[in-house]
Image (cartoon, rainbow, N blue to C red):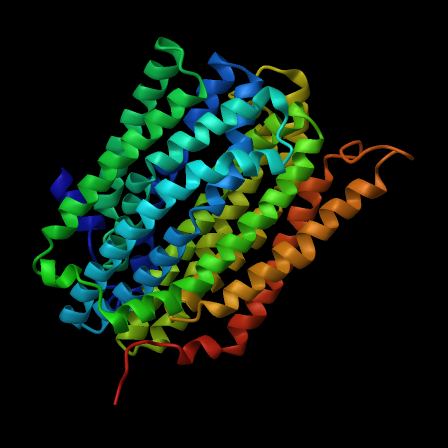
């Protein structure tokens, strides 16, 4: 059975066959994998919310923006490697493909060691700067220190699975992730409900499970001798390839850094509303993670599809695939929006039984619902541009929508709804999500315009005569 599934959904050359068929075959295991990965953070929240309380739930949520901020190195490496791997695979340049993978592995190792040292040192300061409520400060700090100390597993899983996807294999990363996800769920319950370790327990469960999935991915990669060969010589970073990795990945890393900084600033505003709003926001972000999965899935599929076909010189297939991908992405998002509107309150009740948190979270979900369709458009067009080698345009659009649009609107709406003489946080918490919705819609408009301009068509790293 596993063999048949691997043949159906395993590594594939996306320069041949129907673009729609390529995208569906690639996206199905990727979507299931994204679902499993989202379960990491979701199960963490469900377990602490039900076994520890809303304070622990808020602590996990308050830690998120800081965790994301210090993971930007891995984001840059992952995006750069994915583009290079897909284009060299499409161009059938085996030696450059092997050297790219080796350079990426070494860069990931060095970056992981750096984050493992810096993360625990800066976490307390950042939590204090964000005015994290005193009742959740220590739990947030414990969670972050443990997550950063074990970050190497997460880094290697995400980057190596990205390489495998760039080769057209979204099946094996799925298998490894499902194994790790099941382990994570079991360890969550054991450490929190059994041992009473609180938020520290979910952090330990997560890093152990991610380390196992990383080892499995590395074993798979080292055995793909028919596609690439990894030796000690290959692992030595190549200056030219490292430069390409930085050039392609840096814009995405900077985008994530700016996005994370903006989220930290917004998190400061969120914290000013108190623990109930922080808890509601945490739950909404967990549900949001599932709602965004199809968008990110099709965006990743378009990056691989565009990369392989740009590498093979098949621009006509890229344009046809973009149309097919847009139909798939928007259709799935419309269905998800309907499900959120119908079952939003029931989703909130999985995490908490507090009526105030449920009511707040349900209202926030309703505000965001339509924005998921806009994000489908953004992710698909951005995926094509990144796959072609244009990572700068999506970066600038993200900066505009996050920094120039979302942050001022969020703080502005809070100030407008604040009672006369009231302190920050006494306004309407709806501002957090109205501002996000507006930024998503404008982002879709800007990304669609950039795609139509067509500058991405001239960004390939594969040189042709």
Q: Left or right of 181: which side holds 443?
A: right
Q: Left or right of 296: which side holds 278?
A: right
Q: Residue at x 17, y 73 (%)?
A: 93
Which sits in the foreground, 402 or 150?
150
Which sits in the foreground, 342 or 185?
185
Q: Residue at x 55, y 52 (%)?
A: 259
Which sits in the foreground, 57 or 313?
57
Residue 376 x %, y %: 51, 54
Q: Left or right of 457: which side holds 19?
A: left
For the C terminus, the quadrant is bottom left
For the N terminus, the quadrant is top left
- Whether residue 12 is situated above or below residue 285 in the rendered picture: below
Residue at the extreme bottom of the image, as rendered: 465
- Quadrant hosting residue 179: top left
Residue 411 x %, y %: 75, 45
Q: Residue at x 14, y 69 (%)?
A: 94
Residue 191 x %, y %: 35, 16
- Whether residue 318 is situated above or below residue 49 in the rendered picture: below
Which sits in the foreground, 443 or 235?
235
Residue 463 x %, y %: 28, 82
| Residue 229 in view | no
Q: Residue at x 78, y 44 (%)?
A: 413
């Amino acid at each position: 059975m596993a063999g048949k599934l691997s043949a159906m959904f395993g590594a594939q050359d996306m320069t041949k066959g129907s673009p729609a068929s390529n995208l569906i075959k690639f996206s199905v295991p990727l979507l299931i994998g994204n679902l499993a990965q989202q379960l990491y953070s979701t199960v963490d929240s469900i377990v602490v919310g039900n076994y520890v309380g809303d304070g622990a739930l808020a602590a996990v949520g308050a830690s998120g923006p800081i965790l994301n901020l210090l993971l930007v190195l891995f984001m840059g490496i992952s995006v750069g490697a994915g583009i290079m791997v897909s284009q060299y695979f499409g161009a059938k340049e085996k030696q450059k493909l092997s050297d790219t993978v080796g350079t990426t592995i070494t860069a990931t190792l060095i970056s992981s060691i750096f984050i493992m040292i810096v993360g625990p040192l800066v976490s307390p300061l950042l939590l204090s700067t964000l005015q994290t409520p005193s009742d959740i400060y220590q739990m947030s700090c414990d969670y972050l220190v443990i997550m950063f100390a074990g970050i190497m597993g997460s880094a290697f899983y995400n980057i190596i699975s990205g390489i495998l996807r760039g080769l057209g294999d979204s099946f094996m990363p799925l298998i490894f992730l499902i194994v790790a996800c099941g382990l994570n769920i079991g360890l969550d319950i054991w450490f929190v409900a059994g041992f009473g370790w609180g938020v520290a327990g979910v952090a330990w469960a997560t890093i152990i499970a991610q380390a196992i999935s990383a080892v499995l991915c590395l074993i798979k990669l080292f055995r793909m001798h028919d596609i690439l060969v990894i030796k000690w010589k290959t692992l030595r970073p190549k200056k030219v390839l490292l430069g390409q990795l930085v050039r392609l990945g840096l814009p995405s890393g900077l985008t994530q850094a700016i996005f994370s900084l903006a989220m930290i600033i917004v998190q400061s505003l969120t914290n000013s509303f108190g623990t109930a709003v922080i808890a509601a926001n945490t739950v909404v972000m967990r549900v949001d993670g599932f709602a965004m999965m199809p968008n990110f899935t099709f965006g990743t599929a378009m990056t691989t599809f565009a990369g392989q076909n740009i590498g093979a010189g098949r621009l006509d297939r890229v344009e046809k695939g973009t149309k097919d991908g847009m139909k798939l992405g928007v259709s799935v998002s419309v269905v998800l929006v309907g499900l959120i509107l119908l079952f939003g309150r029931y989703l909130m009740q999985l995490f908490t039984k507090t009526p105030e948190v449920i009511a707040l979270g349900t209202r926030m979900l309703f505000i965001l619902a339509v924005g998921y369709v806009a994000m489908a458009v953004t992710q698909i067009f951005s995926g094509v541009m990144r796959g072609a080698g244009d990572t700068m345009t999506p970066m600038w659009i993200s900066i505009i929508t996050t920094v120039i649009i979302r942050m001022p609107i969020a703080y502005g709406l809070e100030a407008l709804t604040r009672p006369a003489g009231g302190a920050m946080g006494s306004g309407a918490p709806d501002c957090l999500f109205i501002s996000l919705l507006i930024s998503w819609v404008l982002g879709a408009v800007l990304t669609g315009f950039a795609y139509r301009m067509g500058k991405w068509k001239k960004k390939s790293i594969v040189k042709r005569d």
